[in-house]
Image (cartoon, rainbow, N blue to C red):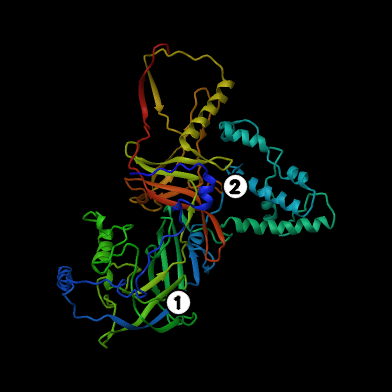
């Protein structure tokens, strides 16, 4: 029976604590009966037979006649890369403070295309930085530099179709014209001659003239650090006829000289598998090889998701190796599962820190086990072996080798959206290859769809000709008409097969041009359609025009896609590198342009 209390004076009840009770607490704890916790911390097992049966079930009674390594001694020799050579260029000293991707992939940023100013975004960035430098130094010459190095909106005609055909490009160009500074023009003027100074053409006197010249030098240094590009005389390693990079790195010591050649690199990430090793014969005159000899205590290899060696431990559920479902041809996954599930606790680690960009060879390794036995560890592959099997981290070579190459490559590279993208496809009906510009770079620097840009430019030229030729159409008198050639989208650039020089059997692909044929065009010579992407404009923007050839085997039936984008990474010392690089990947198969010649067409009614 519940007793109810209804006091008349609640204050008196609380003050005198007539009905004590527990209404809150701030700590709960057990009251131990002893001060010794030895037994409580023990995992006591009453049934020893059960433990033995579990060990039998897990196969722990199947012992191996082997001991565990307890002591190891290793002797290592290494040599560092000292020379870099782009394909067809002079060798230069290897720079260890630069990621190898930036060194190999660097390409010049195009600032002109067919005599037109492009990359307006970078030009504007340079101009803003220059005006910022003027403001920091208190130099009031902003308007003079804007007037001298100004953006100018070109006249509306067929030559400026890429501006007026794109509404957004025209709006931004018009907004910049006469209001902002083109910083690349100033940079170009400073690099043209050594005697050119930033104060040239600006009304000023000392000390302002000296201050302007000083920040002009600072301006050039800032740009070279902002965008990593090849210097004059050492062009980039990109091979346009192969659609890939080609370069070499070599390491010479007092014993030998080894050259690492990357002949087909276009994947976007450099590592040991991109190189072939060749040893140059002859006397070596390099520095003495670095040697390292020391003793270690081997330790078990550990990795995330590693299966526990004892049955009573719980495994981490983040990595489920048992859930991997490889196909019968997926050897890499099968190797990973075998390493992780079967032999994970049989691998031991002897740590050794390698300098980045070095070629290392283990000259000798001895291991002593817990039985006191000393074992001389040799490579499973003998240098005298005739067959050259593939193995992980091993460089391809004509001779057997046991050399490890630690490439000075970036750990993580940030890649922008493609500035340019070209798809090379085979068109068996037209018997040629097409370079389809799927992504082009507009004048303001932003990427745009190549098909939409081609339609806009075509419509712009049709409108120009339509305004100049408003003549009545002549009706057809026949029921059929003859069409000499069908139209092809302007972003489809043809590559026609031609014979190689002095060779009547081998062929290569040469860049050609389609004609921009518009009904009513008063010109007797239709304009040739030129590509908009820099990768297809090889030889078109030079003083002496050059044809562009691609090896026929570089475009298989599956096709190939080439992209140009900005790459950005941070190196070991924290320095940031930004460069424009190329990347190649597989295509999407064959394509058809619909190009046909000599067609008979029915005339529509009313024509």
Residue drawn 36% across the image and 79% down it? 362
Residue 389 location (% of width, % of height): 26, 68
Q: Is residue 308 above or below residue 165?
A: below
In the picture, the quarter occupied by the N terminus is top left
Location of residue 175 (image quadrant): top right
Residue at label 2?
Answer: 111
Q: Residue furthest right?
A: 205
Instruction: Characterize the local packing of mark 1: few (<14), some (14-19) or many (20 or more) Cα atoms within 10 angstroms.
Output: many
Q: Secondary structure at mark 2?
A: loop
Camera-nearest label, 1 or 2? 1
Left/right placement of residue 283 relative to residue 225 reads: left
User: Tag on residue 79?
Assistant: 1
Residue 432 location (% of width, % of height): 37, 41
Left/right placement of residue 525 relative to residue 214 reads: left
Q: Nearer the viewer, residue 163 or 506?
A: 163
If you read the primary sequence from the N terminus, does the residue marked by circle 1 or circle 2 appear first?
1
Q: Residue furthest front?
A: 8
Residue 60 location (% of width, % of height): 18, 73
Instruction: Characterize the local packing of mark 2: few (<14), some (14-19) or many (20 or more) Cα atoms within 10 angstroms.
Output: some
User: Tag on residue 196?
Assistant: none
In the picture, the quarter occupied by the C terminus is top left
Q: Is residue 540 above or below residue 597?
A: below
């Amino acid at each position: 029976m519940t007793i109810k209390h209804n006091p008349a004076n609640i204050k008196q009840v609380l003050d005198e604590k007539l009905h004590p009770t527990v209404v809150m607490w701030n700590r709960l704890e057990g009251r131990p009966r002893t001060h010794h916790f030895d037994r409580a911390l023990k995992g006591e097992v009453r049934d020893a037979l059960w433990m033995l049966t579990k060990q039998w079930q897990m196969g722990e009674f199947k012992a191996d006649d082997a001991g565990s390594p307890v002591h190891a001694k290793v002797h290592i020799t290494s040599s560092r890369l000292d020379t870099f050579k782009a394909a067809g260029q002079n060798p230069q000293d290897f720079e260890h403070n630069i990621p190898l991707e930036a060194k190999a992939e660097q390409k010049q940023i195009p600032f002109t295309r067919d005599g037109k100013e492009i990359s307006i975004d970078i030009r504007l960035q340079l101009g803003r930085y220059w005006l910022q430098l003027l403001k920091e130094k208190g130099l009031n010459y902003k308007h003079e530099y804007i007037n001298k190095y100004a953006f100018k909106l070109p006249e509306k005609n067929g030559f400026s179709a890429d501006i007026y055909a794109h509404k957004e490009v025209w709006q931004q160009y018009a907004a910049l014209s006469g209001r902002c500074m083109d910083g690349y023009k100033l940079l170009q003027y400073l690099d043209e001659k050594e005697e050119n100074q930033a104060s040239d053409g600006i009304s000023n006197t000392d000390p302002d003239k000296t201050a302007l010249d000083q920040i002009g030098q600072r301006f050039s240094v800032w740009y070279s650090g902002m965008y990593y590009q090849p210097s004059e005389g050492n062009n980039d390693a990109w091979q346009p006829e192969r659609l890939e990079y080609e370069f070499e790195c070599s390491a010479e010591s007092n014993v030998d000289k080894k050259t690492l050649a990357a002949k087909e690199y276009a994947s976007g990430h450099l590592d040991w598998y991109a190189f072939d090793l060749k040893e140059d014969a002859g006397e070596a005159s390099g520095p003495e090889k670095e040697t390292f000899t020391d003793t270690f205590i081997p330790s078990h290899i550990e990795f995330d998701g590693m299966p526990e060696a004892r049955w009573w431990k719980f495994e981490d559920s983040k990595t489920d190796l048992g859930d991997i479902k490889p196909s019968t041809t997926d050897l890499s996954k099968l190797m990973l599962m075998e390493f992780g599930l079967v032999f994970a606790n049989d691998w031991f680690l002897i740590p050794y820190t390698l300098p980045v960009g070095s070629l290392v060879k283990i000259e000798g390794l001895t291991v002593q086990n817990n039985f006191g036995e000393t074992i001389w560890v040799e490579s499973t592959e003998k240098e005298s072996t005739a067959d050259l099997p593939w193995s992980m981290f091993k460089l391809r070579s004509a001779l057997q080798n046991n050399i490890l190459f630690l490439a000075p490559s970036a750990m993580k590279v940030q890649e922008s959206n493609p500035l340019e993208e070209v798809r090379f496809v085979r068109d068996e009906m037209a018997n040629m290859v097409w370079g389809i510009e799927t992504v082009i770079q507009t004048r303001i620097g932003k990427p745009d769809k190549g098909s939409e840009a081609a339609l806009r430019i075509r419509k712009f030229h049709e409108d120009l000709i339509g305004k100049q030729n408003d003549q009545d159409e002549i009706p057809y008198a026949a029921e059929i008409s003859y069409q000499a050639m069908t139209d092809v989208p302007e972003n489809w650039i043809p590559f026609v097969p031609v014979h190689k020089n002095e060779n009547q059997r081998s062929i290569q692909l040469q860049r050609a041009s389609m004609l921009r044929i518009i009904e009513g065009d008063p010109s007797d010579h239709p304009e040739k359609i030129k590509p908009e992407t820099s990768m297809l404009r090889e030889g078109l923007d030079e003083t002496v025009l050059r044809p562009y050839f691609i090896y026929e085997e570089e475009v298989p039936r599956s096709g190939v896609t080439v992209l140009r984008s900005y790459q950005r990474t941070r190196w070991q010392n924290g320095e940031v590198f930004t460069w424009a690089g190329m990347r190649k990947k597989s295509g999407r198969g064959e394509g058809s342009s619909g190009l046909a010649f000599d067609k008979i067409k029915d005339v529509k009614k009313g024509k």
